[in-house]
Image: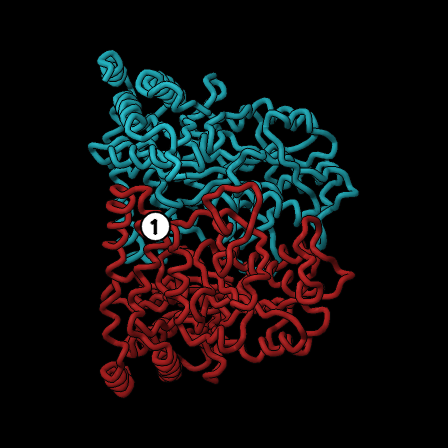
Chain colours: A cyan, B red
Amino acid sequence: MYPGLAARAASLDAADGLAPLRDLFALNEGSVYLDGNSLGALPRHVPERLRDVMTRQWGELGIRSWTEGGWWTAPERIGDRIAPLVGAGPGQIVVGDSTSVNVFKAVVAAVRLAGQDRTAGQDRTDGQDRTAAEGRTEVLVDATTFPTDGYIARSAARMTGRRIVPLAPAEMPAALGPRTAAVLVNHVDFRTGRLHDLPGITAAAHAAGALAVWDLCHSAGALPVGLDAHGVDLAVGCTYKYLNGGPGSPAFLYVAERHQAGFDSPLPGWNAHADPFAMAAGFEAADGAVRGRVGTPDILSMLALDAALDVWADVRMADVRAKSLALTDFFLECVAAYAPPGRVSSLTPAAHAERGSQIALRCAEAPAVMDGLIARGVVGDLRGPDVLRFGFTPLYVGFADAERAARVLGEVLAAVPGRVPPGRR
Amino acid sequence: MYPGLAARAASLDAADGLAPLRDLFALNEGSVYLDGNSLGALPRHVPERLRDVMTRQWGELGIRSWTEGGWWTAPERIGDRIAPLVGAGPGQIVVGDSTSVNVFKAVVAAVRLAGQDRTAGQDRTDGQDRTAAEGRTEVLVDATTFPTDGYIARSAARMTGRRIVPLAPAEMPAALGPRTAAVLVNHVDFRTGRLHDLPGITAAAHAAGALAVWDLCHSAGALPVGLDAHGVDLAVGCTYKYLNGGPGSPAFLYVAERHQAGFDSPLPGWNAHADPFAMAAGFEAADGAVRGRVGTPDILSMLALDAALDVWADVRMADVRAKSLALTDFFLECVAAYAPPGRVSSLTPAAHAERGSQIALRCAEAPAVMDGLIARGVVGDLRGPDVLRFGFTPLYVGFADAERAARVLGEVLAAVPGRVPPGRR
């Protein structure tokens, strides 16, 4: 142990205004949880709240809860609770479905909006969406993205007569042009932790007459996003990472207010109808972000997320960001001090403007090292073949955790041979 | 009260082999719950099971539960638990997403399969799905269906270059032909409770070279379906009605084994990939029904459903069906005895072969009558403008419930004027 680092950690924790929030979460004492970017920790009060949802709202009130208990409007109500965390005004976010399903809605809707801009709504008829001969035929897709976005974007392009162009986000501004319908980019790369330039790429897309769709899975709840301020058109995000909604909790969809009237969903389920309980044969889209809803909301998961969001009541995202950067800076400093030279190298940009809330270390022996870390109570995760991934969630991770994680990493690296013996290749 | 009917109810209940199952559910004593076709009742053991999922699996084990706790394979594992309830062999059902999203997957996949049958898989490339000039251009859609099916089928047709043809199910056999790609039918009509001819319409579709897609929302858990026996191609269903999975619990998708290799999902999320954790840039579809998965499964809702399915352990669907028919017959008999003449008429077919597990009564004063029923502890629901809907769920509804519901209906009808006064029109 470097006593200097441990002492620094203690004084940083003592000065941390967010430190008291840690008590809101159920964490295993004795271990350091650095996997909140995969599965956020359990807020302690959630089980009791969900017990009430089950026994009283479902068991006693039953169907009355759809109206009296606020079940029916949960998607937009909870969306409005997420909105300030991602810099969105009210009425633009609905919660529901998986991230993948929301990527499909967003990319199809973006392509149609890009078409509507030029042809005054002729896209709304049955039959094929307009095709390659008609202009904006390309969707630029972050080639480094979490793969589901690419798979789903390809399907969305196929079904609307467009094609996808995989590119690194940094290459997008030069590739944008009159053939671009939309760009789809991850705000923070799930593997490296690189934060992409949301304002710049969005502005470049707009300058080319295209729409910008952002995937906020690794930034919502981790750093300021500024959806409204930067003029983002559509966005999707996950609630089970930095928003602690529970395993596989429902995702969210942001539709900027100016696009809502033209938002033409590929999944126009009855929940998106202007008058769902009329049960009319013809579809008439609801006004507002509600148009992004599809089927009956999944109430147990939805209300667990609703409860989990209570921890944000008095939290400023600027404070979260400041702590996140301080934590990751300090972790990198500790790794430099504790790790044997040459064994790990950071894939995460050093520049604050390019860093999300995780540190990814490349390590030739990553699988064995992560096993060793977890065995010693430091929980990160592995992204094959050679990446050690450590997520820093400022609401419940402290500086002593960062110091301990780096120190244990040094010990594990010392115990795991740096070269794979021939017999184990 | 007709003592004869009450006595008959008591003796029918005493002879009912399913009667002991009622104790497995949390029901409000003092009321009669006839809305299980909207929201199934809470199985008593579910809250405790979900508490364990939250506090131990999520709170203590955390990400380890994705593997050790069986979270990752829950969609197909729970699908295999539903399978025997709808007459399906294992490996053909996955749970997840809403019914609407599954209708989209099923209709798009059916249209593509109908195309593949004739052109040896040339449909799999990027670009437009094949268009009107190429043959099977029509999707016949049950015009009486729950509206979301129609809305979603229209979108699926639009995005694959087909068109929908709304028809009553009885008209479908005559309308099927070389232009038909698929039919989409509700097994039981949500409004009238009419049971459609699944074997006959499926066989007619096949004879015309088309595929049959069935929506089982109002039949799964209510009566034998026989998916495999009748050669159904694709099916979707709901788990929060007769399967008691909880409000908005995940839906399911059935893909007959013979179609799985050709199942070409419009929502190919990372959960449908052959090797999801490779996080590869290219999509390669998994084998089997797993191909119908999309994004990360919603674990809290999924495992509440898993627990809820325990009540089916020793239940034979033939017994459920026999009791359901006996209950609805008896209810109709009691209504005939208790209701003032001419005030209500049944929309539900009298023939057993055409009846689901609900009774729908047309009543000019339906809104006021349903309010009166609920105020007196008989919980059905209203389907506007003039339908009183009563769902009979054989696991927890008994004959005394049916007699009481009809008796209270008679009292309410006597109290609600039979003609709307001019001032209230």
Q: Residue furthest front?
A: A422
In the image, what residue occupies the spot 44% across and 47% down? B296
Q: Position of residue B157 (x, y in %)?
A: 66, 58
Q: Position of residue B367 (x, y in %)?
A: 44, 64
Amino acid at the residue labelled 1: Leu
Please give left or right for residue B234 compared with residue B325 in the image: right
Q: Residue furthest left?
A: A29
Please give left or right for residue B34 compared with residue A156 in the image: left
Can the viewer see residue A299 in this picture? no
In the image, what residue occupies the spot 40% across and 80% down? B340
Which residue is disc 1 drawn over?
Answer: B300
In the image, what residue occupies the spot 29% across and 70% down? B313
Q: Nearer the viewer, residue B166 or B140?
A: B140
Q: Secondary structure at mark 1?
A: helix
Can the viewer see residue B249 in this picture? yes
Please give left or right for residue A369 compared with residue A202 in the image: left
Q: Position of residue B277 (x, y in %)?
A: 45, 44
Q: Position of residue A408 (x, y in %)?
A: 27, 26
